[in-house]
Image: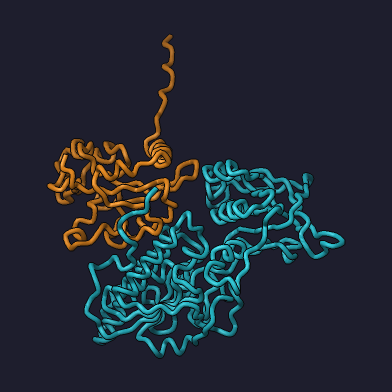
Chain colours: A orange, B cyan
Amino acid sequence: MASDEKILFIDYARCIGCESCESACRFVHGRPRINMTRTVGGIMAPVYCRHCETAACVKGCTRGALMKSADGTVLLNPVLCAGCETKNCILACPFGGIFCTGLEDAVAKCDLCQHRRAMGMAPACVEICPCGAMHFVTREEAQALASPEYEAAHKKVMDHVRPVIVPLPRRQKG
Amino acid sequence: MPISGTPMNFAFAGSGPARTNGRSVAVIGAGPSGLAAAGFLSCLGYQVDVYDKLPKPGGLMVFGIPAERIPAERIAQGVEILSGRYGVRFHPGTKICDRRQADDTGDELSTRCIDLDELVRGHDAVMLCTGSWKPRRLNIPGDDLKNVYTGLAFLFPIRAAQYDKSRMSSIDVAGKNVVVVGAGFSAIDVAHGALGQGAARVSLIYRRTRREAPCGTHEIEQFEAAGGQWLELVTPIRVVEGEGERLGQVAGIECIQCHLGEPDEDGRRSAVPDSCAKVVLPADIIVGAIGETAAPPFAERLGLESVRKNEIHWLQMTRMDGVFVAGDALTGPSKIGKAVYSGLRAAQSLSRWLTLRAMSRELEYREDAPIRREDLR
């Protein structure tokens, strides 16, 4: 693992669900690539791409439109993507971090503000978060930030994004 | 839960200050929309002056929302970057006045008054971001009694007392029985504030159930864990006045039992009062935390109603040339993120207007897609 790979880490225990991140993303990219969700219990949390080391979306994409870049960011190549009928990437992502737009650019996903970083800026959402809940850090640093309060809130949000569905009992034949 | 190492940066749109473009903009209001607009404009090289009625920039992010949720030092850091690095001039304690305007919460902290026309004359453009500071009243008999407060009137002194003790006094709740009406985040904040300041008993009353509560069940569980009392399916109908020594003061609140009816237009089941089951809850202090409304100054003169309906051709420009509006002042109470977005879009629109006008090319204005209702949910 390249230790200098940076990812986004959102401390769900600190986030108040104010939507500033989503707004900044919408302003910079047109279609937000980070989206606020609200669990049944009322926890507000932004859902976002984790830029996984072994990304299920990259494996799932039949067109090769998703790729891991040299710096570890999972990038979308819209030229290859447009018009995909399977939406495998959306289904594959365990974190709900790829979004269906319903427009010609079929999906929206975070690129950690690639063009901003090229100009020496941090991702827009990280700079505008009033709570200081968004961290642009290495994977190790992110692991260190995951407090028990975070884990508890994160589990509730993930249960909401990817609910565990208990299968119905099989109907008896005959 | 450490705070992010990346500083708050309202001027996030660019990588640093641009060469000055020789134009100046006044921003009225230093809340989320005003600061976002100021940040965007200073990235483009405008000289920005920010006026605010409060002694410190930040608006409700600093004076309404508790520091446990939004660290005040993070907002201060963002303001410091604007003033230190981008040369934004802050004018705290200054209200832009209109004689017809009724007083809002927080007016007591402003010491200076500037006329809108003076501001328009002194700058190339003006951005109005005054937010929503007019609390909604309970609107029941007795809501004018002593010790009945609005959520903002209760929270504001707790936060403001640290800036100007001589002029603000917190409401003394120690040992008292506090009833908070509402189930939004400000109701929860009031309830926690009252518990933290030593109230004997704090009850939250809500007309629907916790499943419908805007703050969510998680917050209510935390409130109960902190020792608070949650009462649901009750709506207040009258504030009960005390007798003898406590004449003119609160003694309790009369409530009526409700049940859940059909879903209303936003999909939540409505609360239907039952006529028979009434109860009086004893109370020393009642706080109606049922939200705020926007009461922007000069609303009529600026034609804000037409701006809301997108009748003015230039995005978020008011009836007065070069005066733009953004945030809660335009849309009514919303979330910080919506205010930020509105401020950014208005700032972009303002800059385009000034640029095209300077070249006499206003006709080339491309109609921006208006900010739709679903963007402002």
Label count reads 0
Q: Nearer the viewer, residue B74 or B266?
A: B74
Residue at x 25% of width, y 83% of height: B21
Residue at x 50% of width, y 41% of height: A41
Q: Nearer the viewer, residue A93 or B71?
A: B71
Quadrant housing residue B106 = bottom right
Residue at x 32% of width, y 42% of height: A96
Q: Nearer the viewer, residue B107 or B338?
A: B107
Which quadrant does the C terminus of chain B fall into? bottom left
Quadrant housing residue B139 = bottom right
Residue furthest to the right in view is B244
Please provide percent x and percent y for residue B70.
Answer: 45, 57
In the picture, measured across the screen, residue B12 lies left or right of residue B309, that is left
Residue A32 shows in this picture: yes
Residue furthest to the left in view is A70
In the picture, measured across the screen, residue A77 lies left or right of residue B85, that is left
In the picture, measured across the screen, residue B346 lies left or right of residue A80, that is right
Residue B157 versus residue A39 in the image, above or below: below
Residue A112 versus residue A39 in the image, above or below: below
Please provide percent x and percent y for residue A86.
Answer: 24, 38
In the picture, measured across the screen, residue B66 lies left or right of residue A123, that is right
Quadrant housing residue A95 = top left
Residue A107 shows in this picture: no
Residue at x 18% of width, y 51% of height: A78
Please provide percent x and percent y for residue A65.
Answer: 16, 45
Please provide percent x and percent y for residue B19.
Answer: 22, 79
